[in-house]
Image: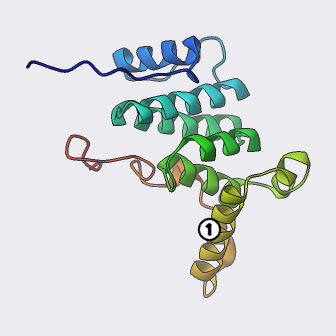
Amino acid sequence: MQGSARVINLPEDTPEVFTIYLRCLYRNTIACEGRSGSAACFGLAIEVYILADKLGDLTSANLAIDHIVHLSDERHGIPSYRWAEYIFDYTPERSPLQRLMVDFLVQEGSKSNFEGEYFDTITLTFAKAVIKEYYRLVREGWDKKVKVSFDRHASERPRCWYHQHNDDHPKCT
């Protein structure tokens, strides 16, 4: 038997996301045609990550997460709570994308991120993850200047910090 056919249903994945994913496969980059730098590009990159992760494509998932970090730097902002909830609903617990979203909020967020309608509706799972990370950083920075612990942007982390790895995708060197 040369291979077996496997059907994967993708009802949540839009043609636009699938098109960006296919371009990612062939070009090794995430391109949000006509939307580069926009808030919509955050969402598309998040959806490409989730699709790639669902398909077991670590290369594309890692490219998508790198693109999300790049967009955050470029826009000097983070994805909305709406996307945080989506991430926590559609990724496995403690996935790299969940870690990134928590780091965005705890380490790069501003006071305004903790106010308003979105914060009042965040999921319990996301709220717990944010609180755990906050207290981990408080403990880490207790004997140092706390500001240093809370002011670490995702782009300042080592290149593979949010990547997934296996035998075919070893850690970056």
- Of 26 and 146, nearer the camera is 26
Q: Residues within 10 Å of mark 1 (few under 14, many from 20)?
A: some
Residue drawn where x is 57% and y is 37% of the image? 68
Residue drawn where x is 37% and y is 46% of the image? 164
- Of 31 and 58, nearer the camera is 58
Counting labels gives 1
Measured as percent of width and height from the top left, residue 22 is found at 42, 15
- What is the residue that sits farthest to the left in this orientation? 1
Horizontally, residue 51 falls left or right of residue 7, namely: right
Q: Is residue 136 above or below residue 151?
A: below
- Of 131 and 28, nearer the camera is 131
Horizontally, residue 21 falls left or right of residue 88, namely: left
Q: Quadrant of residue 15?
A: top right
Q: Dot 1 corresponds to which residue?
A: 133
Q: Quadrant of the N terminus?
A: top left
Q: Quadrant of residue 62?
A: top left
Q: Is residue 20 above or below residue 99?
A: above
Instruction: Describe the element under mark 1 as helix, strand or loop.
Output: helix
The type of residue carrying mark 1 is: Glu
Measured as percent of width and height from the top left, residue 75 is found at 70, 35
Residue drawn where x is 61% and y is 82% of the image? 139
Q: Is residue 114 above or below residue 7?
A: below
Residue drawn where x is 58% and y is 16% of the image? 14
- What is the residue that sits farthest to the bottom in this orientation? 143
Measured as percent of width and height from the top left, residue 32 is found at 58, 18
Measured as percent of width and height from the top left, residue 173 is found at 26, 50
